[in-house]
Amino acid sequence: SQTIHQWPATLVQPVGSPLSLECTVEGTSNPNLYWYRQAAGRGLQLLFYSVGIGQISSEVPQNLSASRPQDRQFILSSKKLLLSDSGFYLCAWSTPSVNTEAFFGQGTRLTVV
Amino acid sequence: AQSVAQPEDQVNVAEGNPLTVKCTYSVSGNPYLFWYVQYPNRGLQFLLKYITGDNLVKGSYGFEAEFNKSQTSFHLKKPSALVSDSALYFCAVREFGAAGNKLTFGGGTRVLVKP
């Protein structure tokens, strides 16, 4: 069966420090991968998606970047965190088919202080 | 562009009563609709989806949803709510050809089931 791992679960970082969140998927190949951010426990905003290795698309301009160095690995990064980067970050994967659901990791609670 | 709307920020219901969470959608082609539930500080869990076929879709934990094309709605329902159903619920739409076949989410509806 397929599983998705996301870590760390919580993170407190000072303003101006770098960030690296990692997400890996097991049990499938060539998944679509997504990074979402959830602010204040409400709606989800899509940040990045990837349909293959090295293929990253950004949905909104921001202080973050994403990379996909391996088929089932998706990394969210920042060189210098801002206070506004605080939030709950969720990684998700799906098959390329439009009629399949996406599966989510357990999320990372990031607090920038 | 595809979009979904959840008009209610919060729904309060007594345990044992029917629960309905509303969702309307907007897509240019055929809609692929999904419902997810989120418990505090957790990821989203998939409940059910509508792809094609019967308008009434049954999912996990006794939930079902009714697809209504004329009203562009996909409301989530449960005949008898439990206290443990208290959570945040998201409706989502996926549209063929949209960037990465991405899921677009509504703003979420918080459900509070009182004993």
Image: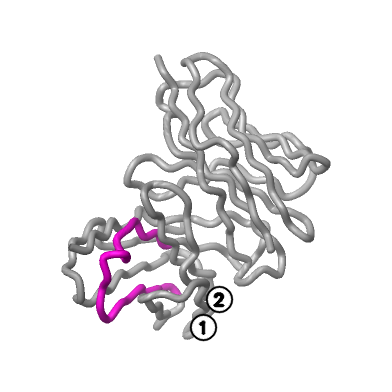
Q: Quadrant of residue B38?
A: top left
Image: A41 above or below B29: above
Q: What is the C-alpha distance between the residues marked 1 and 2?
A: 6 Å
Q: In the rendered structure, the residue with mark 1 lies on which chain? A: A
Q: Amino acid at mark 1?
A: Gln
The x and y percentages for residue B30 are: 78, 56
**Rendering quarter of residue B114:** top left
Label 1: how many Cα within 10 Å (few below 14, some 14–19, many 20+):
few
Amino acid type of disc 2? Val
Asked whether A84 falls inside the magenta stretch, the response is yes
The residue at the point 54 percent across, 69 percent down is: A32
Mark 1 near mark 2, Cβ–Cβ under 8 Å? yes
Mark 2 belongs to chain: A
Image coordinates for residue A30, horizontal then vertical, percent? 53, 74
Quadrant of the drawing holding the N terminus of chain B: bottom right
Observer-nearest of B112 and A92: B112
Residue range of the region highlighted in magenta in the rendering? A72-91
Residue on which the image places disc 2: A51
- Name above or below for residue A48 compared with residue B27: below
Q: Residue tagged by mark 1? A: A55
Q: Say if the magenta span includes residue A56.
A: no
Instruction: Tell me residue A39's x, y (percent).
Output: 38, 54
